[in-house]
Image (cartoon, rainbow, N blue to C red):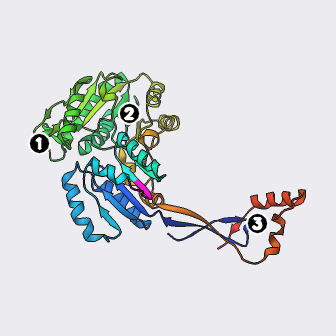
């Protein structure tokens, strides 16, 4: 948090230049339901570290966590500085009518647009952590079982209700034929012959999302899974093939344990397919060739990128997390959270005396002092401590 000294030029050589990190003021944090504790506490830590007061709005969809947060947080945080507001869309709408100094929202692009519109009325700065359809390219030279293990783990983690999960796989027809049995093997190894009885597989958050996912099971052709149980809100780990680009499963973020496989004939076709869509929150590429990985990285854009693995990059506080384009704006995690919630104030402290030295910058201007001022402003000197 301490002031960060920066370099000066010749005209400010005797002055002190620094960046002061100061809090924005009152921050509104709106959290989602899929990781209701983590995605509330992580930005809260950054906002507190930066010195802000915070209004927290947990998701009403994850009812039990919302209740626990409302009960416990006031026991540990100064209630004059931190408040938890409960309620649904109507209460959130009322909150957004107020002027906050910063808004941090995690959720869908649809609601993100509503939040951004509300923030614009007050010119409030904002971070939007959204989602999208995250592509996963698999090259022909990969070991299909290695890919299947890694993809199945992070596709079906939390029953697929993860914003950075791979939304679909792009691969050749030949790789698809090798990958499907490998995915079946990985799913059986992870969740047993009957995944419904596995304690390691979650359930869908509510009936609305269950019905939406159940509808997506009719897209393409089911080659693994496809079973569902409305009473338990259970959707089996599912793999779809023969999926058409125009089908609903390829038009919206799936946010569930369904993985479509889309065939492409080449790396170029895969990259074109990715670039025809909105920029994703995450992008994954698997290949034994570092050149292929580098090509995908260089020729696409996404919030985050991982070669030959899943969302392990999220475990690194040294990396920023956030989206680009329709998948969001702004970054957090680790020190990036502190920076997000801090106003970086540019400061220069000058001497009240030594006025004679300033004569060169005052009018009238001639060729000599114009040239000198231009040179002096551009010259970088050492940092004045």
Indicate the secondary structure of the residue bearing disc 3.
helix
> Vertical placement of 36 versus 246: above or below?
below
Crowdedness near tag 1: few (<14), some (14–19) or many (≥20) residues, C-alpha within 10 Å? few
Q: Is residue 272 magenta?
A: no
Q: Is residue 101 magenta?
A: yes
Horizontal side, residue 320 vs residue 349: left or right: left
**Residue 326 occupies which quadrant of the picture?**
top left
**Residue 363 occupies which quadrant of the picture?**
bottom right
Query: Which mark is on residue 142?
Result: 2
Observer able to see residue 56: yes
Q: Where residue 121 sits in the image (x, y, percent)?
A: 46, 49
Residue occupied by mark 1: 197
Mark 1 vs mark 3: which is more N-terminal?
Answer: 3
**What segment is highlighted magenta in the picture?**
98-103
Indicate the secondary structure of the residue bearing disc 2.
loop
Crowdedness near tag 2: few (<14), some (14–19) or many (≥20) residues, C-alpha within 10 Å? some
- Asked whether 136 or 58 is in front, the reply is 58
| Quadrant holding the C terminus | bottom right
Q: How many marks?
A: 3
Which one is closest to the eye, mark 1 or mark 3?
Answer: 3
- Asked whether 178 or 152 is in front, the reply is 152
State how far apart marks 1 and 3 are (Cα). 73 Å
Residue occupied by mark 3: 11
């Amino acid at each position: 948090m301490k002031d960060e000294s920066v370099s000066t030029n010749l005209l400010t050589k005797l002055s002190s230049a620094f960046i002061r990190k100061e809090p924005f003021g009152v921050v509104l944090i709106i959290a989602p339901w899929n990781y209701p504790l983590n995605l509330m506490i992580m930005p809260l830590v950054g906002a507190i570290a930066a010195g802000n007061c915070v209004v927290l709005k947990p998701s009403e969809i994850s009812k039990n966590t919302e209740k626990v947060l409302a009960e416990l947080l006031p026991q540990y945080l100064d209630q004059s500085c931190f408040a938890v507001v409960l309620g649904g869309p109507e209460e959130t709408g009322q909150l957004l009518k107020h002027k906050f100094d910063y808004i941090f929202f995690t959720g869908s692009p649809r609601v993100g647009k509503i939040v951004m519109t509300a923030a614009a009325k007050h010119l409030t700065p904002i971070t939007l952590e959204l989602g999208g359809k995250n592509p996963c390219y698999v090259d022909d030279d990969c070991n299909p079982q290695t890919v299947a293990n890694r993809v199945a783990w992070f596709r079906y983690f939390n029953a697929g209700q993860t914003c950075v999960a791979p939304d679909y796989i792009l691969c050749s027809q030949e790789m698809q034929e090798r990958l499907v049995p490998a995915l079946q093997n990985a799913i059986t190894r992870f969740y047993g012959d009957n995944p419904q009885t596995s304690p390691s597989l979650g359930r869908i958050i509510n009936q609305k999302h269950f019905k939406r996912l159940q509808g997506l099971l009719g897209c393409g052709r089911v080659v693994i899974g496809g079973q569902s149980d409305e009473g338990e809100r259970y959707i089996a780990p599912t793999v779809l093939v023969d999926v058409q680009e125009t089908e609903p499963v390829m038009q919206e973020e799936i946010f569930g344990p369904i993985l479509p496989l889309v065939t492409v004939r080449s790396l170029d076709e895969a990259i074109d397919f990715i670039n025809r869509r909105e920029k994703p929150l995450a992008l994954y590429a698997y290949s034994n060739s570092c050149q292929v990985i580098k090509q995908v990285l260089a020729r696409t854009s996404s919030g985050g990128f991982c070669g030959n693995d899943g969302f392990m990059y999220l475990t690194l506080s040294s990396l920023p997390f956030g989206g680009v384009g329709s998948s969001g704006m702004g970054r957090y995690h680790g020190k990036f959270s502190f920076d997000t919630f801090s106003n970086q104030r540019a400061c220069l402290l000058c001497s009240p005396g030594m006025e004679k030295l300033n004569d060169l910058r005052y009018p009238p201007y001639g060729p000599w002092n114009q040239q000198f001022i231009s040179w002096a402003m551009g010259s970088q000197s050492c940092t004045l401590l």
